[in-house]
Image: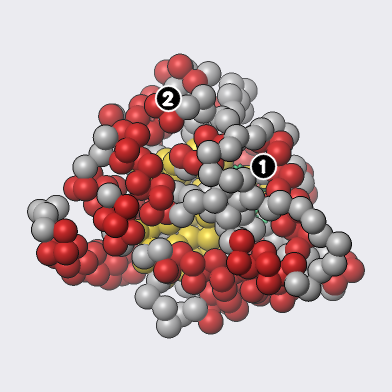
């Protein structure tokens, strides 16, 4: 299965840039910094609290505190996904300004976009979502939307939408609803982290927006602290779920993989997308996430193929890009069938 998952052409729709930084890139960045003796990721099989996960992002942010590093990280992350046979990648990142280094939020986004452009000759299409961190408040949220609208004008083909992320235990997502409604009007898609932890108050209003995709949705169903109304609303809108097994396991938002929400939604034939979340911090890759899904939920090679191919439907790119991807997948399909002597 390992070989198969690696060979499988894949679609990554939920990857935070700073959480995706590999050990190799960390070493490059560390070479430029002094007095840093920290661990930036969790080893395979380890567990932590969400608080400890967020502590890692804070550490990484100290390394990516200038436009050059942001460029380097984005460039490397794209190459690494490409090496893992990812053919379409949606990155998301929180624009950050750092006074000491002269990095503004504009130059942050410019660095990310420049790195994406510089990877255009690779066989991987990349799009960007600007992230609103719920720890930073509504005012900053509006600024992020304005930034997205500005860059949408100059880079219409690259800016795909807005994400809501950050510590799910902080703030109330409903405060950001006017921003999301405005974003929708501008043609920006919405990928919102919802119910990563039980959130009975805010969830219903958020689901009714509705977002174009939900990040995690760990606690939507009753057994995980949600309720039937949440589930029915997600089903009614057919809102796809971005599911990140290793992330949820290490962050302990699920007790174990057998109880991961993938099973609940997959059995309902609801759109499920396997994603990495933070491949660097959680020491994983998209191939490994597919493998993990296969071994945990007893999925066959053809199930994995279907999951991967169907993810194209939920991407935030233009229809013609999706068509090209589907054509490409057809070619890969026959190659893989031949390579593994199977019928998908
Ligand atoms: C919520 C998360 C996250 O934006 O600096 N982030 N938000 N839940 C998660 N589950 C583990 N993983 C990452 O990448 C790092 C930022 O992404 C969000 C957090 O806001 C984190 O600071 P960027 O590229």
* Dot placed on the residue nearer the N-terminal end, 1 or 2: 1
Crowding at dot 2, Cα within 10 Å, few <14 / some 14-19 / many 20+, comes out as few
User: Viewed as shown, does residue 104 lie left or right of 268?
Assistant: right
Question: Mark 1 near mark 2, Cβ–Cβ under 8 Å?
Answer: no
The residue carrying mark 1 is 53
* Residue 183 in sight in this render: no
Colour setting: secondary structure
* Residue 288 in sight in this render: yes
Residue 325: x and y in percent read 29, 67
In this picture, is 341 found above or below 209? below
Q: Nearer the viewer, residue 61 or 292?
A: 292
Q: Nearer the viewer, residue 6 or 234?
A: 6
Q: Nearer the viewer, residue 93 or 205?
A: 93
Residue 72: x and y in percent read 64, 74
Determine which quarter of the picture holds residue 124. bottom left
Check mark 1 vs ligand 1: CB closer than 8 Å? yes or no.
Answer: yes
Residue sitting at x 38%, y 42%: 292
Residue sitting at x 48%, y 60%: 90
**Label 2 secondary element:** helix
Check mark 2 vs ligand 1: CB closer than 8 Å? yes or no.
Answer: no
The residue carrying mark 2 is 259
User: Viewed as shown, does residue 28 lie left or right of 203?
Assistant: right
In this picture, is 98 found above or below 292? below
Residue 338: x and y in percent read 12, 64
Determine which quarter of the picture holds residue 46. top right
Residue sitting at x 16%, y 59%: 340
């Amino acid at each position: 299965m390992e070989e198969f998952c690696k060979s499988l052409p894949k679609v990554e729709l939920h990857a935070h840039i700073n959480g995706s930084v590999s050990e190799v890139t960390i070493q490059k960045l560390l070479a430029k910094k002094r007095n840093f003796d920290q661990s930036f990721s969790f080893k395979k099989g380890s567990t932590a609290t969400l608080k400890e996960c967020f502590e890692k992002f804070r550490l990484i942010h100290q390394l990516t505190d200038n436009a050059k590093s942001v460029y380097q990280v984005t460039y490397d992350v794209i190459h690494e996904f490409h090496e893992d046979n990812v053919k379409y990648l949606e990155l998301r990142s929180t624009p950050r300004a750092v006074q000491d280094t002269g990095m503004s939020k504009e130059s942050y986004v410019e660095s990310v976009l420049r790195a994406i452009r510089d990877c255009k000759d690779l066989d991987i299409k990349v799009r960007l979502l600007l992230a609103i961190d719920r720890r930073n408040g509504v005012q900053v949220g509006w600024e992020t939307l304005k930034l997205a609208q500005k860059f949408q004008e100059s880079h219409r083909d690259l800016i795909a939408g807005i994400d809501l992320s950050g510590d799910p235990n902080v703030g109330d997502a409903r405060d950001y609803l006017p921003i999301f409604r405005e974003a929708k009007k501008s043609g920006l898609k919405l990928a919102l982290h919802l119910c990563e932890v039980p959130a009975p108050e805010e969830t219903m209003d958020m689901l009714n927006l509705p977002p174009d995709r939900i990040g995690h949705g760990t606690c939507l169903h009753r057994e995980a602290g949600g309720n039937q109304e949440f589930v029915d609303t997600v089903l009614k809108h057919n809102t796809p779920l971005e599911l990140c097994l290793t992330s949820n396991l290490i962050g302990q938002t699920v007790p174990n993989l057998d109880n991961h929400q993938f099973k609940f939604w997959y059995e309902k034939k609801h759109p499920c997308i396997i994603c990495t979340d933070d491949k660097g911090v959680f020491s994983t890759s998209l191939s490994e996430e597919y493998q993990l899904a296969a071994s945990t939920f007893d999925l066959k090679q053809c199930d994995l193929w279907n999951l991967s191919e169907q993810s194209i439907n939920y991407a935030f790119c233009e229809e013609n890009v999706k068509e090209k991807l589907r054509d490409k997948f057809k070619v890969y399909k026959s190659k893989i069938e031949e390579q593994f002597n199977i019928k998908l």
